[in-house]
Image (cartoon, rainbow, N blue to C red):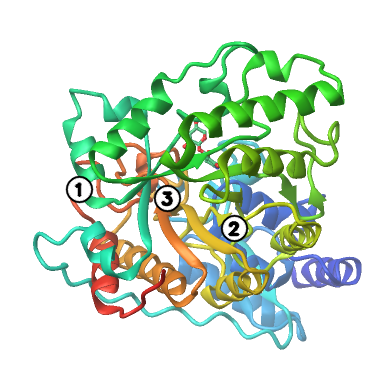
Amino acid sequence: MARTRFAAVLAATCAALATASFYDASYSAPAQMCDKYVELGYNELSASCQNAVACSGLLNATSLADCEAKCDAQAAAAPGTGEAACVGVDTGPRGNGNWGCYLKSRCDGKPGRCSGSWCGYRREGVVPPSPTPPAPPVPPSPPGVTLRQAAASHGVFIGTATNAGYLADPADPKYKLVEQAQFDLVTAENACKVGPIHPERDTYDWKGCDSVFDAAEMANQTVRGHNLCWHTQNPSWLTNGNFTAPELVAILEEHITTVVGRYGTRAYCWDVVNEAFDNNGLKTSPPWYPAVPDYIDVAFKAARKVGGAKVKLFYNDYSADAVNSKSDAIFKYVQGMVQRGIPIDGVGLQFHWSLANHDTLESVASNMARLDKLGLEVHITELDIKCTPKGSGKPCTPQLLNAQAKLYADILRTCLDAPNCKSFEVWGFTDRHTWIGTASAPLLFDADYNPKPAAFALINELLNTTATRV
Ligand code: XIL
């Protein structure tokens, strides 16, 4: 690109986009670029994106080195733009060595239009992220020691989501064996949700949910109930019923009274309401909100009334593990519940994480601590860590497996260091069966049920800690 044209583009861009995070001359919606990358699962790009204020356009680079050299040349040609950073290079299978074309073609929604790399310029004064040293290999944990054995003396649950179908599948016997040997707490992945359990207004189908409770009791496992009220996985009679607000209140109370009443203290706790917030507060959650503005209070009161104090009541959500605007909104709301005397015992932090882009553990610890000050427990409820971004086609290399193991252990340590963190639970345990997809290898055991470095790291962490709690 000619220097004059580039300089003009850059000047216009900088003036127009003082706060924009990423820009390319050929894009008309620059502010959305980073969001788009993240949405597509290319989370690893966001750190660079966040530091970039302007972009030169296509570089037609043929390699990372070429891209970087061209970025440097352009930065030198545009004084004051800061250090150059090559953004969006990709070595994935569809990149064909044509750096960046895969991302470009995905981002502009025109498959096949592959042409060159992206170049971003870091904001003046912003320190480029230093490359993280590779995580060291994880030593295997002592032979024969399971996760639940290692956790036993610490008073913290080590749990997994479990799937009623796989538990009962004679063709896949290892599923049940590993699940029962390794974990002392389980949650039905789907079987106790409103849709499966309450298929008609006047009919309950307990088969799947009962089977999870029965199997758990046989294996001396605790059950964490999930969930009693959500905007998704609802039966069609409820979704399409056009009910009035008083009818919805009656339905919610009836469902909760029936389900919590049936299982009583066989359930250690329930996620009473699931995923009700966005960054701004309560979000539209049909059929409950906005139709029934106080539906959360209604649900928790009904659960306590029938379950008594021994069944713990949780609010559960995702992307609210650390301090951020969504967890602020949740914090404010549960603080209000405590003040109003609405029965709530804790907050479930889902922890659907990705190796390439995640919150800091310091911020997670702060979030746990502020909930502790309210007298609330926290549970890590649905942890999984994408080793590679969804759809990237990239393999989960031994180095990435070690990094994944370290992150699992860091999250566990953060929980063990927080006195109110009482349960550490993964959302599935084998990469064979995960809602994230086997290719992202997010869990503790591989698709053949062999322990991954992450499983060793958790056992080692548990064996090395003296943390205990009641
Ligand atoms: C997921 C299950 O894992 C999938 O099998 C199902 O198809 C969709 O729901 N947050 C939750 C869980 O609270 O209930 C979701 O479970 C994952 C996100």
Looking at the image, do the residues carrying marks 1 and 2 touch, with CB atoms under 8 Å apart? no
Q: For mark 3, what is the residue? A: 92
Identify which amino acid the numbered label 2 is placed on.
Gly
Q: Which residue is rendered at x = 86% and y = 71% of the image? A: 18
Which quadrant would the C terminus be assigned to in this image? bottom left
The dot on residue 346 is 2
**Residue at mark 3 to residue at mark 2: CA–CA distance:** 42 Å
Label 3 or label 2, whichever lies nearer to me, is 2
* Residue occupying image coordinates x 21% and y 44%: 178
Question: Spatial distance from mark 3 to mark 1, Cα to Cα?
Answer: 38 Å
Q: Nearer the viewer, residue 387 or 392?
A: 387
Report the residue marked by disc 1. Answer: 181
Q: Amino acid at mark 3?
A: Gly
* Picture residue at 57% right of the left edge, 11% below the top: 203
Q: Quadrant of residue 428?
A: top left
**x%, y% of residue 384?**
43, 52
* Image-quadrant location for residue 87: bottom right
Seen in the image, is 138 located left or right of residue 11? left
Graded by Cα atoms within 10 Å as few (under 14), some (14 to 19) or many (20 or more), the crowding at tag 2 reads many
Could you tell me residue 24's position as x and y percent? 74, 59
1 or 2: tag closer to the N-terminus: 1
On the question of residue 46 being in view, the answer is yes
Separation of marks 1 and 2 at Cα, in angstroms: 27 Å
Q: Are marks 3 and 1 in contact (CB under 8 Å)?
A: no
* Residue sitting at x 60%, y 79%: 72
Crowding at mark 3 (Cα within 10 Å: few <14, some 14-19, many 20+):
some
